[in-house]
Each structure stands twice: as structure tokens, then as C-alpha cells.
Amino acid sequence: MTDKSLSPTVVAAIDSLEIVARVVVEGLRAGGHRSPFHGPGTEFQQHRPYRAGDDLRHLDWKLYARSDRLYTRQFREVTDLSVQIVLDPSSSMRFPPTGISKLHYARIIAASLAYLVSTQGSAVGLVTADANGFSYLPVRSGALHRNALIARLDNLDTVREWTPIETIRRATELMKRRGVIIIISDFYDDELGILRELRAVAHRGHDVIMIQTLSNEEVSFGFKRDIELEDLETSERRAIDASAIHEQYQSAMNSFLERCRNGAGESGIDYALMLTDTPPERALHDLLLKRAG
Amino acid sequence: MTWLNPWAWLGLLALVLPVFIHLLTRTPASVQRFPTLRFITVSRLPPRARRRIRDIVLLAVRMGILAAAVTALAQPVFVTQEIGARASNVVRAIVLDTSESMHGPAYGQGASSGGATMLDSATEVANRLLGEAETAIVVKTSNPGREIAGAVKWLATQPGVSEIAVISDFQKGSIDSVSLARVPAGVGVRLFRIAGVELDSAFTVDAAQREAKVAIAASANRTFIRWVPIDQEPRASSAPEPDATSISSAASIDSGTAPLSVVRDGKTLSVRFLKAGDGESKALMRSTKIPSSQWMADVLLSIHHDGILAELANSGAVFEFTASSPAGAVDATAGSDSAPVVVLTDVNGTPVVTAGERNSALIIFMSTSQGSASALALTRAAARALSQFPQLDEHETVTIDAERVAAWERRGVSPGKSATDLRTLGGLDASDSSGRWLWLLAISLLLVEWFVRRSPQPDDERAMLAT
């Protein structure tokens, strides 16, 4: 599957986000991985080694008798799974200016997940922001709704005002029952506050997935000369000797990523870092594989 | 390898210039949009300690240009077997001008600061020439032209490439075409001019019906007067002719207390003589200043060149020194700024006639007794100077044109060789230097620098972001 992955450049070249989502999801399926969204369904999906805390009702006692090992049975949720996608359209997502921006990449990931969930008969919704402020598509199932959601993603552009904590809170409130909340962002806006809010969401029984979308340029800070950086959100400018502050930047960035990863892990939140130069289906494959495992 | 102009190596100090330029000059920072500045705490451009590779190449090329230029100025000479043989076979007769004018301060040296004299500079040149030649003699003379013939005779007795080197300030009369005509065709002639004090601080005078620039400088025991004509056209003189040129009238002036004076153009020119033993001489001497008027310069110069007076001064016997009596002797060291200028010295270098200006009058002090032959000669010389200004052309302080001196120079030739065979010339000069190839190298490096400067930047951030 890895070799057949479509490069981000090829994916970005496809005009229709729906086709992109379909291509990405087809790529996922070709790899033999099914939906990672396990729920209280009746269709047996697979066994996995027993872990402390697993529901004892799902222990396969017969298999234990045969193999003398404890395995938990997992079932595939067939229906009634609600997935709410929260997408960060803030100005910082417009980076990098050339190639695939973080927003574009996030739209592909969101559309692919929506397509995947929808084709499995589950409901999916979208919470983001646009020029008018809060933008919301309710959690519904069906092809028509899916197309509407993808169309909304297609037209999504960056906004100046983005309040992630409020948006997550409202997205949770708008879910009528427990489900999966996927937040796609670079988490540059108060990541500790966001993590606190996501922890509260997880405590309410929701399954939370945190997808951090970043570009390789901002992670590795590949600048070498004297440059003047302009903040995409605040328009503040700072002249720097890039090679001189490279180490300091790298250290701060690593600390930030570590905070996000550890914060998510401590709260039982699935976390995935997706770089824009990684093929989307490979990034999704890794995420789904991790959740399935 | 040797260097014709080793002082040019000081130009290597200029190599620090490109380094400073590279450190101080920064390419303007390009503006890049970035998602967040929260990880960047530096708020301004910190000093950059190192440059990129491309800049180092540019710096190296620029330093190479300067180094090539400095080396070219130093005029390197690769001493080949031929050049070495030629240089080492030179037999040189060095004629060193020790005339009075050579005791003046050298170019760039103050007269009263006790700095190097022109003779000191000339001696340095003579020593260098002495070291460069296989065999050499130094002839010290106050009349270089007169010693040329003797130098030629000595050179005729020596094997190798013969050369006469004259080191002088080349005042008119020091050397001329006639004296140089005695030098045979195969003997080289090299003339080294020693520059004297600048004339920037001199004053302009009307002398001998011509406008001239005169610089008077005085040291503890000598006076230096340099004359340079400004215009060449003589002008009609309106000076009256006072009847004071005869010995008898001079004697009458000398015996009296009234000063020698003459009215010219409505202005009274007054000269007063003070002899040894005059009670007020010492006090007056302290209160005088260096003469600054044109007519005073004329009088002093005329006295300085007076034949009778010079003979008397050189004989040393006619001046009645009273060394045991300080009041009688001329105290040339009295006062520093107001010290009178020395007009004449005796054979021992002791000032015997000095002069100063006070209340627009020229005061002349001399260590002679009233009525002596030297006193009369002095009075006569001063009176003659007042009555008839000297002709500029007669002054030895007017130097020979540089073009004429250059025309007299020629190279020596080995015996039995043609005079046009430049490869057998004696000594090392600019034509032996590899300087022109270094200039070519410097120009080539300039082209390289232009190409390097215009080459695109390989690691441009925009290109990096576009990938």
C-alpha cells in the first residue's frame, strides 16, 4: 500500500474533493483495513489480545480454552455511529504558501474520513468557521449529506477569527449522543486550553481523535539566511538570523509537539501528527491502524 | 625574488577592508509568511559571526584583487641568472651633493623640528645604491657637476657595467649638460632627486622684477631659503638706485648708529646692524621674529650669496669671536620661536651672521667688530641688496626641471654590447619587474568578482519552499 500511495501533489491536483476522498478511501480499503470506529455492533470483526480494563463480556472464553490465552472479541459498528469533524480554518493553516497548505491537507483528511464514515452507513457532521463565524453541518448519514459536507469543505477558506475551545464545546453540545469527535488543527492556539477541553469531551464519553496537521517547513525550520518572518495570524514581523536561532526554534517546536502528544495520551485521546508532505492515505492508514490495534 | 618597492607591502593592511565590508553588509532580509512566531523569541537581527560559502568565495576574490594590486605595486623581480649576473656586475660611482641647500629639511620634515635633512635622505639612497652594486664609491661634493669627470675616470679603471649615480636636489648650477657630456656612451647615468621642504607655507614676493614663491625656514644653526619663480615674464623695475654701494659709504653707515634705509614705492626699507659688544643686541635678538617680507628675503639671500662675505666666513680668521663674552657672540639659540635666522656660518658651523625682523625693520646681528673687514663686507652686501634685487636665475635654489633630469638619465651597457640591447643593462628597474602580470591578474580577478557577485543564490528560501 505504501508504494501505491498517491503523493500529496497528485492528490492536490485533483479538483474534486469528493473524488480525492474516494481515492484516498479506496486506497485505504485496498490495504485490507476496515473501519476503525468500533462500536457496540453485533458483527464480529476481530480478536485482539486482552488488555486490562476490557469488558469481560467480550472475552472469548472458547479461544482461551483452546489457546490458554486471553483474547477480546471486537465488533464492528454497523450503524448509529456519530462522527463530528472539527476543522481549524485559522490563518496559520494557510501555510506553506506554495504547494499543499495545511488547510488543503486538512480538508482532504476531513473529506476522506467523512467519505469513509458515510459509506459505512454512519453519520458524520462538520463544525468549522467561515466569514460569517460559526459554520455547522449537523451529524447525518446518507450520500446527499456527505456530498453537501464535502462541498462545504471544498469551499472552506481561512478566517481571521477562530476560537477553538468554544468551537469544540459547541460541537460537543450539538452531538445528541456519544460518538467520535475528530479535531483537525495545527493547535497553535492555546494547545493546553484545547487539550483541557478535549479532556472534558472525552470524560463525557466521546471518543476523541486529535489530528495535528503541520508542514515540514515549520517543523524542521529549513531557513538558513537572514529573513523577516510575518505571522500569518497577527501580521507581526520579526527579523531573524535563521541559522542562529534554528536550534532554539527546533527545541521549542519539539517541546510543543511533545506537549500535544503527551497531553492527548494522558487524556486517552488518540493523537496523530500528519505532515503535509506525507501521502494522505498513508497518514490515514497509520491513524486507523493505530486505532484498530 | 626581490622587490623594487618593498614599502608597497604596507598596502596589505587594506586587506581588512573587504572583511569589514562583508561583515557589515547584509543582504536585505526577505519577508516570509510563517504560521506562528510563538517559537521565535529573537526580536531583532543578531550579529552574524560567519558568512555563507558563497560570500567567502566573494571575499576571497576581493582580497585576491587587493593582494595582487599590492604585490604589483611592490614590483617583484624574479632574479634570473641573467638579471642576477647583470645586477651583481654593476660598478657604480655615486656622487652625493653636500651643498648648503642639501642641509635643508627633507620633504615632510619641519625646519625647526630637528627632523631629517635632505642630506640624510640622500645618504640613505647612497647607501642603498652602494649595497646593490658589486663595486662602488661615494663622492661627496658641494658641486656634483665638477666631480663627474673624476667619477668617469675611476669607472674606466673598473670592469663590468659602469654607472654614475648623482644624488642631489638638482638646483640650477649643480649639474648641467656640459658636465654630463663627459660621460662616455656606455656608462649609465642615474639621477636621484631629493625633495626639500614644501612651499605651501611660503610667501609670494616681487623679486628681480618677477613674481616668486619664497620659503624661509630656520633651524638652530642654518637658514634655508627656497625660490621658485611663478611667472617667467620679467617686469620693469621701478626701484630707485640709492648711492650706498661703495665701500666708503658702507663704512660710513657701519660707523654710525643710523640704520641703512631706502624708500621704495613710498615705503621705507630699514636695515639695522648690531655688532658684537652692542649692549642691546641680546635683548633685541630675543624680541625679533623670522623675517617675512619679500625685501628682507632679498637682502638675506644677497648677503648669503655675497662672495666676499662667504670667503671671509670660510676663512674663519677675520671674525672676531668673543666666546668668553656671551654678550659679544651671536646667540643663535636665544628664543625658540623668535630665534633669528642664520645667514652665514663659519667653517665650524658657528653662526656669525643672523637676522630677525622687528618693527618692520630687518635687524642683522653679526659677531664682528665695528670697522672690521667682515662688518664692511656685510654692510656693503646689504646695501647692494637694497639697491638692486638679485636676479632669480642667479639663485642656485631654483631647481632643474624634472623633464630635463629625466632626459639626462640612461642605462649602462656591458663592455662589447650594443647600447640598444636592453637585456644587458645594469641594475634592476621597473622593466625587470613582474608587476604588469600581477596587474593582469588583478583585472582578471575583477571579472571573476563580477561573475560571482551576479551569480544567483543557490539556497534561496523561496526555491526551498517551492519544492
Image (spheres, rainbow, N blue to C red):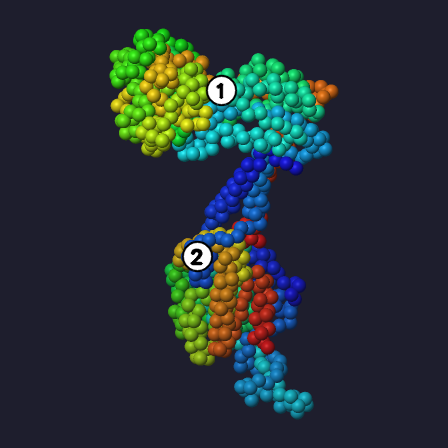
Q: State the image coordinates of residue A122 (x, y, percent, origin top left).
A: 52, 73
SS of the residue under disc 1 = loop
Closer to the camera in the image, B21 or B262:
B262
Q: Is residue A40 above or below residue A133?
A: below
Give the image quarter of residue B357: top left
Q: Amino acid at mark 1?
A: Gln
Give the image quarter of residue B336: top left
Quadrant where the N terminus of chain B lies?
top right
SS of the residue under disc 2 = loop
| Number of the front mark, 1 or 2 | 1
Marks 1 and 2: CB-CB under 8 Å?
A: no
Q: Residues within 10 Å of mark 2 (few under 14, many from 20)?
A: many
Closer to the camera in the image, B161 or B365:
B365
Is A283 positioned to the left or the right of B38 in the image?
right
Tell me the residue at 40%/10% (across/down).
B234
Give the image quarter of residue A73: bottom right
Is A248 positioned to the left or the right of B216 in the image?
right
Q: Is residue A198 above or below residue A159?
A: below
Tell me the residue at 59%/62% (across/down).
A279
Report which residue position mark 2 lands on.
A232
Q: Is residue A220 above or below residue B456?
A: below
Res. B337 in view: no
Tell me the residue at 61%/68% (across/down).
A28
Q: Chain of mark 2?
A: A
Q: State the image coordinates of residue B63 (x, y, percent, origin top left).
A: 56, 42
Closer to the camera in the image, B419 or A121:
B419
Report which residue position mark 1 lands on.
B171
Q: Amino acid at mark 2?
A: Leu
